[in-house]
Image (tube, rainbow, N blue to C red):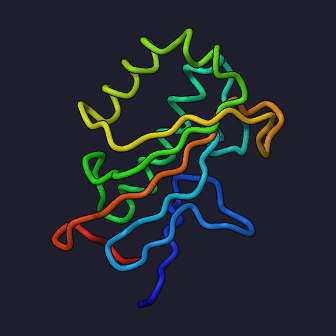
């Protein structure tokens, strides 16, 4: 089975990784921190970083023809779990704004650090996209 990289032009150009890898109709979404197009982590704390990170995931998903309901698994890496929990309601509102009432299998994992020192969150995901919407790069 051929694998295809998915690197939407709306996201920073990857070097040494891919934003997504499509294998059949399964899209493996690479870890997304809160990087904006200029390669800067967005300011504003965990809620704004969640918004940017999850938006980056959804941008890659859309580039392959996917929609939020195609997400089957999400892993969220956090440098400060209590901070994430304290802002859970706000993060939930952002989730529903971006993805609607879609809740795939999820895991939240605490870590001591991420690739960019100022990153508070990184999100990876897997999606299964129906053939009739699938866009192969």
Q: Compared with residue 24, is residue 117 higher up or lower down, i.e. above or below?
A: above
Quarter-of-image position of residue 120 = top right
Q: Quadrant of the N terminus?
A: bottom left
Residue 121 in the image, given as x and y percentages of width and height: 64, 34
Give the image location of residue 28, x and y in percent. Answer: 47, 63
Quadrant of residue 103 in the image? top left
- Residue extending furthest bottom? 1
- Whether residue 69 is situated above or below residue 109 in the rendered picture: below
Q: Is residue 66 left or right of residue 17?
A: left
**From this viewpoint, which residue is outermost toward the left?**
132
Residue at the image point whose x is 68% and y is 67% from the top: 17
Horizontally, residue 40 falls left or right of residue 137, namely right
Q: Look at 55% across and 15% down and name the residue there.
A: 85
At x 74%, y 69%, the residue is 16
Query: 8 or 79, which is in the foreground?
Result: 79
Residue 115, placed above or below residue 102: below
Residue 130 horizontal side relative to residue 61, left or right? left
Of 23 and 42, the residue lying toward us: 23
Identify the residue shown where x is 28% and y is 51%: 67
How many discs appear? 0
Of 77 and 136, nearer the camera is 77
Instruction: Point out the image quarter for the C terminus.
Output: bottom left
Residue 41 screen position, x and y as percent: 71, 34
């Amino acid at each position: 089975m051929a694998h295809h990289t998915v690197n939407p032009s709306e996201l920073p150009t990857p070097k040494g990784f891919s934003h997504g890898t499509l294998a059949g109709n399964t899209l493996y979404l690479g870890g997304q921190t809160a990087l904006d197009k200029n390669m800067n982590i967005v300011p504003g704390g965990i809620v704004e970083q969640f918004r940017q990170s999850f938006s980056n995931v959804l941008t890659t998903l859309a580039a392959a023809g996917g929609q939020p309901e195609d997400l089957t698994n999400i892993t969220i890496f956090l440098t400060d779990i209590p901070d994430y929990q304290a802002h859970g309601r706000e993060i939930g509102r952002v989730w529903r704004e971006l993805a609607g009432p879609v809740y795939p299998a999820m895991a939240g994992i605490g870590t001591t650090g991420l690739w960019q020192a100022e990153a508070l969150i990184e999100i990876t995901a897997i999606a299964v996209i129906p053939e009739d919407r699938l866009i192969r790069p």
